[in-house]
Image (cartoon, rainbow, N blue to C red):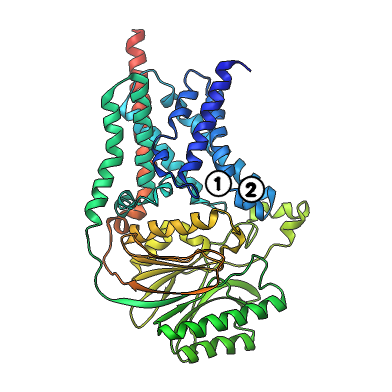
Amino acid sequence: MSKEKGLRIFYSLLSGILLILSFPPFNFFPFAWAAFIPLFFSIQNKSRSTASFLIGVSFFLFLGEFLFPLSLYAWWAWLGAALYGFLLFTIWGWMVYPLLNCSRFSLFQVLAVSSAYICLQIFAGLGPLAFPWVDLGYSQWKFLPIVQITSLIGVNGLSFFIIFCNLLLYWGIKEKKFLFFVLGLLCFFLPTLFGIVRLQEKITGKTVTAALIQTDDHKTFKWSYQDFQNSLIELNHLILKSKQSHPDLIILPETAVASYLNENTAARNLVRSWALKTKTYLIVGTLLKENGSPKNSLVLVKPNGAWNQKYIKIWLVPFGEYVPDFFKPLKQFIPVLRNLANIKPGKKLGIFHFPEGEFGVMICYESSFGWISRKLTLDGAKFLVVSSNDAWFEKTPAQQIHASMAVFRAVENKRSFVQVGNTGISCVINPLGRILLWSQPEKSEVLIARIPLESGLTVYDFIGRFLSYFWVLGTIVISIFVFAHQGASEHITET
């Protein structure tokens, strides 16, 4: 291997390492604003295929570390997800290669590359293999001032600022122009200034008191009869303990009652007794069976023990809760696929009616999709709740990564966000993204918090449904302009 080739591979891997350090558990969020610079230098004056491969390698390293918790489930799931990411970013590199590997700076080229990256993020969040966890903007969750910009343009908009800054700094180094450095820094400081001003706002008004019931169950707990009985004993103790705080609402984790509640009379009577003894509302994570199909569900139990409100999870975890149709033929070759649950999705978003006001509910994976929280907000939710089971992640950073998204959902919609995790992390985030409560994982406890209620809407709430179209259309229009301009310039030169 030549020295030049080795150096290019090193630069490509360095970008991957900087991205790794930007996200949990390291949380060195400033690194994200310059992480791509070594990668951009590594592909200069290389062929399109080589440049695309180097970009793919950089992201394979990043995603390989980022998605490593999937290996706890199955090594092939981790490798498949990392290779899927490698493929997506290699395609992105192939598409933007002419814009990256040019000799002169063009603002429109930089805009085209940046918006194309956001289109890639959007695409990664679509379909049965959707996985929006790796959006660049999520790396900034520890720096609350800049997170505030998501109330206008969502987490994808923050990602745009990050990649745009990387490109400006790269060109500043390449052409030794101070102006590009100034413009790059403005990408960071202008949203930060907006956030500093927004954080001066006071959150006042009505609150509700919630008791978050965090258990300490390992990933296989509750799925044998004896463990199921032990988990109910633990829940009973924690719920009765929460009564001392007189909460308005008690929230249990996902599948806290790991039985078909509409068929198991004993479990149903126990849940009813919790409501009667505490004299409060309960959100219970459980399973329901309808038309012979299992459903991952939440039910809202009234103080009198009755329940007539339910939510059935609409966005299921691929290869965790079901096997996507495209992959079903593989069952005959991969035995583990034959043993997966065949949970069926719901069809409606979850709005629960409550004396203090409506609130929106989600289950686990769904909190990573900004559009779900936005629609719940538009449907009248005064606060948002996600009931989760992160025991599958064990002690990996994935627990923190998942919980950190609560900050963005809160800011995007100006709604308090409550997450209750089976083994944690459980948290309460106020409408401006401030952390009111953040639990230690793998600890059984009752967490009491006052949740501010909000009814106003953000700019993101109004325009969020159109932003994906904006990024895609903007990328197409700018790219057509750039390539048309390049063609005209080449024609003039030839003439």
Q: Is residue 19 visible?
A: yes
Q: Residue drawn 58% across and 48% down?
A: 67
For label 1, the crowd category at 10 Å Cα-Cα, with few meaning under 14, some 14 to 19 and many 20 or more, is many
Which circle's residue, 2 or 1, is located before the other in the chain?
1
**Quadrant of the image for the N terminus?**
top right
Above/below status of 13 relative to 410: above
Describe residue 358's horizontal placement relative to residue 255 as left or right: left
* Image location of residue 148, percent across then percent down: 30, 53
Residue marked by disc 1: 66
Q: Quadrant of residue 349?
A: bottom left
Residue identified by numbered label 2? 78
Q: In the rendered view, tell whether residue 164 sits above or below residue 74.
A: above
Name the image quarter holding residue 111: top left
Q: Give the residue drawn at x 49%, y 83%.
A: 241
Residue 82 position, x and y percent, is 60, 43
Specify whether residue 369 is in view: no
Percent coordinates x, y for residue 455 in the rendering? 28, 69
Q: Amino acid at mark 1?
A: Phe
- Mark 2 to mark 1: distance in Å? 10 Å
Q: Nearer the viewer, mark 2 or mark 1?
A: 1
